[in-house]
Amino acid sequence: MPKIKTNSGAKKRFALTGSGKIKRKHAFKSHILTKKTKKQKRNLTHSGLVATVDQKEVRNLLAL
């Protein structure tokens, strides 16, 4: 049986933590930043974790 290929878009967007959780970046931080408050932009800077309901799908895309 052939190996499953990693989705190239997913490998650029997600990273594994040491404990096996999946790290992600927040959306809405790339453009049209003038109308967003400093607080909103600052809070979007920090990375988050993929929700537990979505982890199975992301792991599938990353071929884990």
Image (cartoon, rainbow, N blue to C red):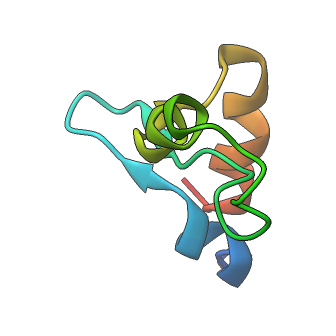
- Judge left or right: residue 15 versus residue 28: left
Which of 19/28 is in front? 28
Which of 30/38 is in front? 38
Vertical placement of residue 59 versus 13, above or below: above
| Extreme residue toward the top, this view | 52
- Judge left or right: residue 12 versus residue 42: right
Vertical placement of residue 61 versus 25, above or below: below
Which of 27/15 is in front? 27
Can residue 2 be seen here? The reply is no
Vertical placement of residue 21 versus 8, above or below: above
Residue at (71, 59) in percent of width and height: 34
Vertical placement of residue 51 versus 14, above or below: above
Residue at (71, 50) in percent of width and height: 27
Number of numbered labels in the structure image: 0
| Extreme residue toward the left, this view | 18
- Judge left or right: residue 20 versus residue 42: left
Residue at (63, 46) in percent of width and height: 59
* Residue 24: % across, % down: 53, 46
* Residue 40: % across, % down: 60, 33
Can residue 13 be seen here? The reply is yes
* Residue 55: % across, % down: 67, 31
- Judge left or right: residue 24 versus residue 27: left
Residue at (44, 39) in percent of width and height: 42
Q: Picture quarter containing residue 19?
A: top left
* Residue 61: % across, % down: 73, 60
Which of 43/57 is in front? 43
Q: Quadrant of the N terminus?
A: bottom right
